[in-house]
């Protein structure tokens, strides 16, 4: 930038408030390497105690080569960290930065640590090292562990299973808050089958836990008293099945104040497993539920406001906040029952003083099946699971992942609504083998998904492949990943010669 040209604006002319906004958009490594040492003003802003209390050293390696990373880290460790180490309270590190950043200086005020992008074996190696072990034993109260790809359960050198989760609890003498997640994994943590042997090693200090597990038994083990101070549990379960454990599911959970339960897949055991668990939480103050419930012949009714209150919420006298998204799929099996309308379901919530909610439901059975969705508004989750054809629209700005499931066709009009009401949708999964009934080729209603990156049509009728891949129906400007059966794709694209599908498949 030419500072002599009066028409140009020099960055040094910007006020501190604007520079702070710019700095907050930059990576810690970029700021320390490129701006510290330029002048006293940049040093004052970049090394301000309000900024440096949390340092994020996650390295985006696709932006820079390995030699550059070493140069950047060398400067930070040698020249900058010794100036600020006593002010740092939180560090975010990845496998490439962890050892050098922690080994460079002592951080006497450090109490929060986030370890991200670790494979399980590398994570265990660091967890067993002096650096991490000493911090967990003596300082860390808040820990975030992001581990991938498929499992957090591995073998140690003696051939015995080491569970990273339990080892963290054993080392974390002062740990009060733990987030244990496995990004991009479909196989969450499983430890229930042998966790009882580690009972004496579990935490007496942990109060807040966020975790993903494979089954309902894992959830019961976490609530069996081994985490004696636990007051907040945020848990995501892959699939809720009938419990095979002998854990008592009747003992009251008097210390639990906040409980969040989300399940990735349908469950047939809402009444048998989930309701009894929730009734144990008599001192609960906040509850979050995101569930898909299948009900068969013995209980072929939608979950409504009256049921939720009478069967669950009435057992929680201190509850003041309830957030939910509950999908019910019911099977009639020839009983020809009458179904409530969406409006009747809304009224069942309003009568129980649930004002901020919405509902959509099928009012008749097709192929002996029907669907209903009830959810809080504004919609609080980043995913919407098992949407059915009864959906009428709404505002879903937070949603990034949408899965659709029905025995009735999804028509072009519904996808138009979705494109408008889910403006930041990135992942779309469609489960529907029924062909579309209406003509989809109306150029006046071209659908655009501006942010859709991933489309899964592996279990979808070929009509939905045409719906999304034909540029006469849909425009997908950002699509990067398409999951589809090869034969279906070959058929729809006429062995990859159809011009109408070239644009959406170009990336």
Image (cartoon, helix red, strand yellow):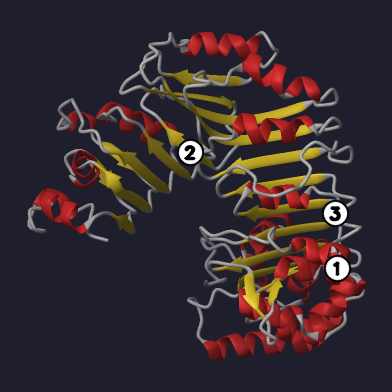
Q: Residue at x 53, y 66 (%)?
A: 150
Label 1: which residue?
A: 172
- In the picture of the structure, the residue carrying the numbered disc 2 is 385
Residue 239 sits above or below residue 53 on the image: above
The answer to whether residue 14 is visible is no
Query: Marks 1 and 3, how far apart in space?
Result: 13 Å
| Marks 3, 2: nearer the viewer | 3
Give how far across and how far down residue 192 sits, in percent. Answer: 69, 58
Label 3 crowd (10 A; few <14 / some 14-19 / many >=20):
many
**Element on which disc 2 rests:** strand
In this rendering, does residue 7 appear at all? yes
User: Residue 260: x percent and y percent?
Assistant: 70, 40
Label 3 vs 2, first from the N-terminus: 3
Which quarter of the figure has residue 313? top right
Q: Position of residue 238 (x, y in %)?
A: 56, 50
Query: Which tag, 1 or 3, sits closer to the chain's start?
Result: 1
Neighbours of disc 2 within 10 Å: few (<14), some (14-19), many (20+): many
């Amino acid at each position: 930038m030419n500072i002599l040209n009066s028409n140009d604006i020099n960055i040094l002319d910007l006020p501190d408030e604007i520079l702070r906004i710019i700095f907050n958009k930059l990576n810690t490594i970029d700021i320390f390497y490129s701006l510290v040492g330029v002048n006293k003003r940049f040093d004052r802003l970049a090394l301000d105690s309000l900024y440096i209390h949390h340092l994020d050293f996650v390295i985006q390696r696709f932006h820079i080569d390995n030699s550059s990373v070493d140069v950047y880290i060398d400067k930070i460790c040698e020249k900058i960290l010794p100036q600020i180490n006593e002010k740092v309270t939180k560090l975010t590190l990845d496998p490439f930065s962890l050892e050098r950043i922690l080994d460079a200086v002592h951080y006497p005020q450090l109490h929060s640590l986030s370890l991200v992008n670790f494979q399980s074996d590398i994570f265990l190696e660091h967890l067993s090292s002096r650096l991490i072990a000493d911090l967990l034993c003596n300082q860390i109260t808040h820990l975030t562990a992001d581990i991938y790809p498929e499992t957090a359960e591995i073998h140690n050198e003696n051939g015995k299973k080491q569970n990273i989760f339990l080892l963290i609890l054993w080392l974390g003498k002062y740990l009060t808050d733990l987030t244990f997640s496995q990004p991009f994994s479909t196989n969450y943590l499983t430890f229930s089958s042998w966790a009882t042997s580690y009972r004496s090693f579990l935490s007496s200090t942990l109060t807040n836990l966020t975790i993903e597990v494979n089954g309902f038994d894992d959830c019961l083990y976490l609530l069996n008293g081994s985490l004696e101070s636990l007051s907040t549990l945020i848990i995501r379960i892959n699939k809720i099945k009938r419990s095979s454990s002998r854990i008592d599911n009747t003992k009251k959970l008097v210390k639990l104040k906040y409980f969040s339960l989300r399940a990735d897949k349908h469950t047939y055991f809402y009444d048998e497993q989930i309701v009894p668990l929730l009734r144990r939480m008599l001192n609960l103050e906040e509850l979050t539920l995101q569930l898909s419930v299948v009900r068969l012949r013995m209980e072929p009714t939608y979950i409504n406001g009256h049921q939720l209150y009478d069967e669950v919420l009435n057992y929680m006298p201190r509850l003041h906040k309830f957030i939910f998204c509950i999908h019910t799929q019911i099977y009639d099996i020839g009983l020809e029952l009458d179904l409530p309308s969406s409006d009747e379901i809304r009224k069942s919530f309003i009568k129980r003083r649930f004002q901020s909610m919405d509902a959509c439901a099928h009012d008749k059975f097709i192929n002996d099946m029907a669907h209903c969705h009830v959810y809080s508004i504004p919609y609080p989750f980043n995913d919407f699971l098992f949407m059915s054809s009864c959906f009428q629209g709404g505002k879903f700005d937070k949603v990034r992942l949408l899965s659709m499931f029905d025995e009735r066709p999804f028509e072009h009009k519904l996808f138009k609504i979705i494109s408008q009401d889910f403006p930041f949708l990135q992942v779309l999964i469609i489960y529907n083998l029924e062909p579309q009934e209406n003509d989809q080729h109306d150029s006046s209603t071209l659908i655009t998904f501006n942010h859709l990156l991933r489309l899964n049509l592996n279990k979808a009728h070929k009509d939905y492949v045409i719906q999304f891949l034909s540029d006469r129906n849909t425009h997908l400007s950002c699509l990067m990943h398409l999951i589809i059966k090869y034969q279906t794709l070959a058929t729809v694209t006429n062995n990859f010669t159809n011009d109408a599908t070239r644009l959406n498949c170009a990336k």
